[in-house]
Image (cartoon, coloured by chain):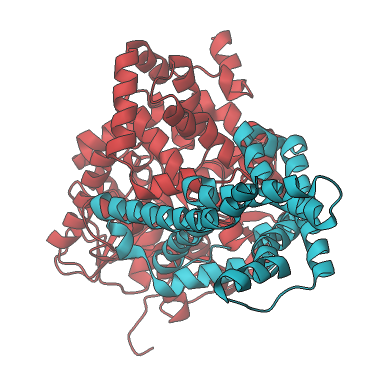
Amino acid sequence: MQDTENKTQALDGKNVVDEGVEKGLARLTPEIISRVINQVLTKETGARFKAYVETCMRCGLCADACSIFLSNDRDPRFSPAAKVKQTILEMIEKKGNVSVDFLRDAVRISHTECNVCKRCSMYCPFGIDIAYMMLLVRRICHKLEITPLYIQDTVNSHSATLNQMWVKEDEWIDTLQWQEEDAREEFEDLRIPLDKDGADIMYSVIAPEPKFQAGLIYQTAVIMHAASMNWTMPSTPGWDNSNMAMYTGDFEISARIAKAHYETAAKLHVGKIVMGECGHAFRSVYDVGNRWIGWAMPPFEVVHAIEFYHGLLASGRIKIKEKYKKSVTLHDPCNISRGRGLHDKAREMVNMLCESFIEMTPNREHNYCCGAGGGVINCGPPWKGTRMTNNREKKEQLERTGAEVLIAPCHNCHSGLEDIVHHYGLKMEVKFFGDIIFEVMEKTIFQKGE
Amino acid sequence: MHSFIEFIMGPMVWISFLLFFLGTVFRFFKVFKMVNEKENFIYTYMSLKYSFRSIFAWLIPFFPVSTRKSPVFYGISYIFHILLLIVPIFLLSHVVLLEESMQWSWITLNDTVADWLALIVIMALIFFMIRRMVVPEVKFLTKASDFVFILIVALPFVSGFLAYHQFFAYQWMVMVHVLSGELMIILIPFTRFFHMFMAPFTRAYTGSEFGHVRHAKDW
């Protein structure tokens, strides 16, 4: 026990022992290693990867983009280009003949020291996509079966249940009905319509909502009801929009997850998919998952909660009783600011909802990742200590705002920021937009022509 | 000796440019072949509008946030890259040679100005070299080949500068100057010097993905 305690608090990832990684490494032979690496490098990469590798002039300008580099006192091994050099570049140079120790480092670097947030692409004069190369390292780790234990478990869950948290079908339906029943205390005829054919909106969430945060579904149901939306939630697998396989390089399962989600929407003949406040799920359904099943853009209109709630507030479908009093700041999740440019709408919404808004700097496309994204938090307890070390810069950015409330419209960010707040003893409450809207809205039903 | 100088200042110049041209065509051919074979989705996401938006944004000095974070390096780098092209193209002695052999001619730089500009290029290269040795995050990424690149670019400028001033061994300096210049031209398509052609494409692709798909800026 003492031993595990020490490991969780280790500040250098090199001291962390991840059981899943170790068991995987023990199974490897030099033949397997070189075969897998060369297979990925020759068959699964093309001109883009070649151009990135051959165009990088090693100028080091990407370093300042990386909050993990900044959090580690500018230790050169944490700069984005250094992560490439220590992983994929060496694999190329050694033609795949790398050691087990090298691979242990490669797993750590690609899975826990990079949030694949793409901020560095905006600092590289050539726009080299280093996140893509880190995902390629993770792809190799996946094929070598040395993915960190906890995130692999979520992928196993995706594979078996099509949701991230081993939620059983009856538990899912039961949770929705339970929330519906509770929400009837506010509106006696409120419903969470299941499988309503031809609804305008299919609302989808990530599996942690029914698992741990069912109250969020309650809040959304109240908002939907008050705004008189024609909406539905699916009762069948495919309801979960999250996708951890996208981050472990298990592209086959990643594609299956995204496909099941779109199929569910297609089966219900809905107009569009509206998704809860999650960033990586949005990246999967809006940007990545569709590509793996051959759609240039998603086959359905995919609307993130920010855009959706913004529409409800701007059109007056939801009315504000009294603005939120406490001072708030806003964290821009990478996957919906750099990933979808929703940062301005988010700010408009904060101003519609709250009295006092304090801007965080840097912000919008330049915001720092929460430090949990890109599957990093999903690598679980063994890596929490190093994650906190790697998030020091983020903590300082939060602290500088001096705000009482931190709005984070993304689940991953939410959990990561909660960890930072507790670890560093910041006096901040972390909230979703849904929490704030729920608190300040008029609990009356919108009538057309109002 | 005389005939050797005639060779490197005559046919070898054309051979160098021919290799440069063929190498560049070959590199692009290979890139496009690979894109067509494996990643033709790139064409789907490439957007002319957002490609140029990104490229132009990155051409404006100190417009991208990144350039403002490292103003000294970017400032020197901007000037270096512009002079690297301007000085040799508009140098009087280069234009005179072309005029003598091909009757091609264009405006030229004043010799004294060109002399100072060459000195700036050399100083920029010294700056890059020192930066590679002292800035930890750059030092970590630096390999021997990075110094070789700096040397290859420095040679024609240093030897040209020395030859112009005729400090010593004029004839040798001219030879080093011509040969190293030709070497650099030949190496462009076959080394990371090729970033001069490839960078606009990587920039354009990232600009397209950010602008067209993700509705975000990338600078």
Residue in view at x 78 percent, y 40 percent: B130
Instruction: Give the position of the C terminus of chain A as an image quadrant.
Output: bottom left
The chain drawn red is chain what?
A: A
**Is A317 left, or right, of A351 in this rendering?**
left
Residue A78, image x, y percentages: 61, 35
Give residue A438's position: percent from left, percent from top.
Answer: 47, 63
Q: Residue at x 43, y 56 (%)?
A: B24
- Vertical placement of A439 versus B105: above or below? above
Residue B194 located left or right of residue B117: left
The cyan-tinted chain is B
**Picture residue at 48% right of the left edge, 20% below the top:** A102
Residue A132 lies in what quarter of the image?
A: top left
Give above or below for A334 relative to A59. Answer: below
The answer to whether residue A115 of the structure is visible from this angle is: yes
Q: Foreground: B101 or B73? A: B101
Q: Is B173 situated left or right of A214 in this image?
A: right
Q: Can I make out residue A427 in this image?
A: no
Residue closest to the eye, A295 or A76? A76
